[in-house]
Amino acid sequence: MDTIPSGTLEGACMAEQPSANSSMSPAIGAPNALLDFFFPGFGVLADAVVRYTGIDLNVYIPLLLLMGGVTLAWRYFTEYAWNLVDKHLMSTVDIRPDDEIYNMVMSWVANQYFAKGARRFVANTNLNSRSWHLWRREEENEEDEYEDSGEASPHRKQKPLAYTPTFGSHWFWYKGRILMFNRTQSASQAGYLTVSEREAISISCFNRNPQVLKDLLLEAREEYMKHDENKTLIYRGASRSGSISEPFWQRCMTRTARPFETVILSEKVKNELIADIADYLNPATRRWYNNRGIPYRRGYLLYGPPGTGKSSLSLALAGHFKMRIYIVSLSSVTANEENMATLFAELPRRCIVLLEDIDTAGLTHTREEGSSDEKDETLGKESNDGSLSRLGKHVLDSMKNGNSSRLSLSGLLNIIDGVASQEGRILIMTTNHLEKLDKALIRPGRIDMIVKFGKADADMTGAIFRAIYAPLEADEEPTAAASRSSSRSRALRDLDNRLLKKAVNALTPNEERKKAANDDEAQRKKEETIAKVKKLAEEFTTKIPAHEFSPAEIQGFLLKHKRDPEKAVELAEQWVIDTRKERKEKELKEAEEKRKAEEEARKKKEGREKKPKEEDEKKEKRRAKQKTKRSKKAKNTDESDASSSDSSSSFSSNEANSASEAEPKNVKSKKTITKTKQAKDTAPAAVEQSSAEVAKFESRTGQQQPVVVVPAPSMTSSVSAPPSIDTEKEKGASLDAQKTPQGADSGYGTP
Ligand SMILES: Nc1ncnc2c1ncn2[C@@H]1O[C@H](COP(=O)(O)OP(=O)(O)OP(=O)(O)O)[C@@H](O)[C@H]1O
């Protein structure tokens, strides 16, 4: 050990401090240097300790190492033992953050003592999972709070804070058992997930029977659901955009159940509808259907112009029968066959499914028409206004996204009531255009009741007026609202009631009389208001023409004067005039836009048609030019040939003229000419023959042979054409020359 090889780490360290402690032995220096490497500064510290206290820390190194080893071993052992216990003696429920049960459990946990008393905790304003598709309840809480606080300004309301235990394990008692709430977060999971999506929670108990955990979950759910009492839960079909994930029902909102009476519709129709649904939902009816092998389904079609109450009636029915409502808009991007089938398969047994605006979904073609060719044709077709139809756009878009399967009529029918479709639900379809629907879609069995909605008649107008201005108890006393849910407000209400009762009991007969008088006065005032509203409603009805405005339009007008019925009546006539004017202007504008779009479409169409025509013309011109060129070429060739050919081709133009003059005089000569002409492409022997005939003719008539009869070009070209011109070209030239229009240079030496 005396000689430490230079270049080693220890050597280097030792070399640095040979004189620091001259008394330090090299045997001590070696581990010191090693430790100094792992714990920088240890050597200096050890030297200082030795110098000032005389304690050599190096002596304790083995002890320290031993302790470290024991700690590690203990950790390993406890982990192993814990795993064994966990595996064989405990029950655990893992809760996924992308399921609604996560919200339920977290909400329950936040109310437990162990969470409230935790020294380290997570503070939340929203306990729900941040998972993108889980419904969030915060808006609703805000509404309640606003009501509870009674504050005039919504800006002053504050979100409540909830405290949940931080990451790690937390023990708590539940029903006399000790349970463990474990909250972990995995950093290794995909970075695109939100924090709460990455976290996992679980609850464990020391028992092989997990019943206590199930009880806890049920309790958590029940508590959570209490919030939804008197509410209509609305779900919508959705899918994460740009992803290939499956569609799902997204809980998008809850609404205070709409009282059925607030939907203005013929009482007879309403009663029939309620009786029909009540009968359908009766368990005995289900058995009745099953026993007879009839599919247990019920369908309703609500049709009428926009804003006449179709959606309102659907929501009111859901509230009345305390059912969840699942809404699918068939014109949405998610509405293809596959997605719809998945969504329908996930429906609960007892619910209302609302298919909105089925006429806009491109299902207007019949099943027979639905051949793929025809579909393809209609897909990208431009509508009257020149724009792609909504469905066409949707389908083209979905095709672009690689999602080409669209919802066909037969597909929808299969989903609605095919062999594999769910039983037990109530299907409500709404449309603005009954006439556009395929008969198959609304045949009995699929649609069992059709309800027509129309524009407001006098009765409806009066009812809408009364519904808006009639005094309601809930208007006067917001604290009496039945839908209170926050514990604070409930506690306050209970206290109020108790105090009120006490106060009433403590009243003297005199005070009792006073209170009764006040009540009577309030009642009298209320009746007066009702009578006044009734009278004003009658007046209002006379000012609004029947069957011209939808209930939504009338409601919209009245809401502008919701605290002043007299003003509403006063302005009613003017509103009618203004609305008519607006409509007319809108119609004119739409007509103008339509006309422009049509004009544009027509121009585009013409442009499209014109293009090939122009191209044809250009081609024709080019061809003509080429012909002319070739003809000229041929002519030039002829001329050069003619100059060098024999005497038979050397007729002058004058001679030709005189010959043409002489032509009619001699029919026989014509025949000869024709014959000779036919022979123009024959061998030189034929030329000799015709020359002989010409000589005969000349000798008989004493006239010269006319120029036209001479098959000079053929003869010259075939006989004395230069070898550089190939025969095909020649043929072409001669044919083209025959086709050449009058006046054009034929290449025959035109006069
Ligand atoms: N018959 C009605 N009774 C009560 N309120 C009505 C009625 N018709 C319309 N309304 C009111 O008009 C508004 C629009 O009504 P709703 O959405 O139910 O009409 P719709 O027929 O479903 O319209 P669309 O065909 O455009 O979907 C709602 O605020 C609703 O309160």
Image (cartoon, helix red, strand yellow):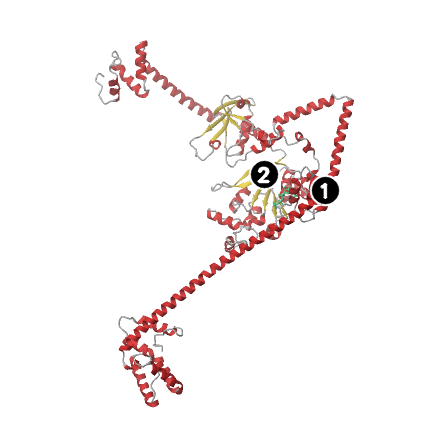
Q: Quadrant of residue 136?
A: top right
Up/down of 87 relative to 17, above or below:
below
Q: Residues within 10 Å of mark 2 (few under 14, many from 20)?
A: many
Q: Quadrant of the N terminus?
A: top left
Q: Earlier in the sequence, mark 1 or mark 2?
A: 2
Q: Which mark is residue 150?
A: none
- Secondary structure at numbered mark 2: strand
The x, y position of residue 178, in whole percent, is 52, 22
| Three-letter code for the amino acid on which mark 2 is drawn | Ile
Q: Which residue is mark 2?
A: 234
Q: Quadrant of the C terminus?
A: bottom left
Q: Is mark 1 within 8 Å of ligand 1?
A: no
Which residue is rendered at x = 62% and y = 51% of the image? Answer: 584
Which residue is rendered at x = 43% and y = 33% of the image? Answer: 189
Q: Is mark 2 within 8 Å of ligand 1?
A: no
| Three-letter code for the amino acid on which mark 1 is drawn | Ala
- Secondary structure at numbered mark 1: helix
Which residue is rendered at x = 58% and y = 37% of the image? Answer: 253
Residue 618 visible from this viewpoint = yes
Q: Residues within 10 Å of mark 1 (few under 14, many from 20)?
A: many
Q: Nearer the viewer, residue 284 or 499?
A: 499
Write down which quadrant ligand 1 falls in.
Answer: top right
The x, y position of residue 641, in whole percent, is 28, 76
Q: Which mark is residue 537?
A: 1
